Image: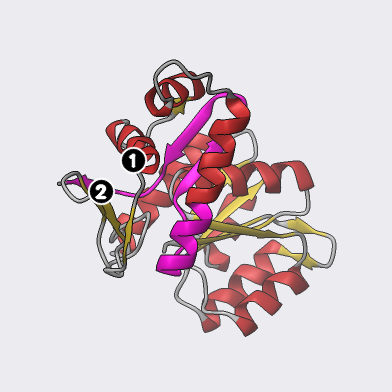
């Protein structure tokens, strides 16, 4: 997994970044403070990329970037309201790889992350690490995870995963999914669809011990965020 840590004290922006980057296939988590950043770096493997605000309640992003750079090799993207030339220069001098201002769109931030990963040689398999893709076997109705653990799918589960895979990481609408997995002459509403997805997510997680790449896009549908191959 490509891990992204968002260090941002503005709760709504932090939540939006975590949700959006998760849909893009990254493992994203957030913290609001410099202390939270230090605890994460001390207790876990360092993330691949840190998105760092400058004005934190208990720390200065410029100083934190220097601190990170001294001890870790992760990429640093500064995301701040400070857009003056002197601030940008200070950001780069403190160790930032990319400097963005806060009116940047979510897609721009995603593009900056992918650009940074390409430059640092850590692109790999962005959604599910170097182990490979998720493989869907159309003959045997099995789903094989990148760690080579497989699970047998029911007819309904296979139809659901197959339809998601056809969208190649894009969003599949609720109506299309419901029509795909509904039995003839039966009514299949959103509650039934959510129940099927919930059971399948639990089944995949329990049998593969991996992050489940089926994500909900609220009010729209679902997406399979990891690279897949259909056999």
Residue shown at 56%/56% (left/top)?
28
Residue 69, position in %: x, y? 53, 75
Residue neighbourhood size for the residue with mark 1, other residues' Cα within 10 Å, grouped as few (<14), some (14–19), many (≥20)? few
Mark 1 and mark 2 in contact (Cβ < 8 Å)? yes
Q: Magenta residues, as a range? A: 201-230
Looking at the image, the residue that sits furthest to the right is: 57
Q: Outermost residue, top direction?
A: 185
Above or below 121: residue 173: above
Residue at 33 percent across and 32 percent down: it is 163
Label 1: which secondary element: helix
Q: Which mark is residue 141?
A: 2
As drawn, 66 above or below 135: below
Is residue 202 magenta-colored?
A: yes
Q: Is residue 165 above or below residue 15?
A: above
Question: Badge 1 is on which residue?
Answer: 155
Between residue 91 and residue 101, name the one nearer to us: 101
Q: Which residue is painted at 69% across and 62% down in the image?
A: 61
Residue 86, visible in the rendered structure: no
Q: Residue 19: name its quadrant.
A: top right
Which numbered disc flags the more N-terminal residue, 2 or 1? 2
Q: Residues within 10 Å of mark 2 (few under 14, many from 20)?
A: some
Indicate left or right for 206 with 208 as reference.
right
The answer, for residue 209, to whether it is visible in the render is yes
Q: Position of residue 1 (x, y in %)?
A: 41, 64
**Per the image, is 64 magenta?**
no
What residue appears at the point 36 percent right and 49 percent down from the top-left corner?
Answer: 226
- Decide: is 97 above or below 147: above
x%, y% of residue 119? 31, 58
On the image, the x and y values in percent for residue 132 come to 25, 61
13 to the left or right of 129: right
């Amino acid at each position: 997994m490509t891990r992204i840590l968002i260090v941002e004290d503005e709760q709504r922006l932090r939540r939006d970044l975590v949700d959006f980057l998760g849909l893009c296939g990254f493992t994203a988590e957030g913290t609001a403070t410099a202390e939270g950043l230090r605890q994460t770096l001390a207790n876990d493997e360092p993330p691949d990329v840190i998105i760092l605000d400058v004005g934190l309640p208990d720390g200065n992003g410029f100083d934190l970037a220097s601190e990170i750079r001294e001890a870790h090799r992760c990429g640093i993207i500064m995301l701040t309201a400070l857009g003056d030339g002197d601030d940008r220069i200070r950001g780069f001098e403190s160790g930032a790889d990319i400097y963005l201002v806060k009116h940047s769109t979510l897609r721009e931030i995603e593009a900056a992350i992918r650009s940074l990963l390409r430059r640092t040689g850590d692109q790999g398999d962005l959604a599910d690490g170097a182990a490979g893709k998720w493989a869907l076997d159309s003959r045997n109705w099995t789903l094989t995870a990148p760690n080579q653990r497989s699970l047998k799918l029911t007819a309904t589960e296979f139809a659901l995963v197959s339809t998601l895979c056809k969208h190649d990481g894009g969003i599949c609408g609720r109506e299309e999914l419901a029509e795909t997995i509904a039995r003839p002459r039966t009514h299949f509403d959103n509650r039934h669809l959510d129940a099927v997805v919930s059971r399948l997510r639990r089944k995949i997680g329990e049998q593969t011990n991996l992050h489940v790449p089926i994500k909900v896009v609220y009010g729209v549908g679902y997406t399979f965020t990891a690279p897949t191959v259909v056999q």
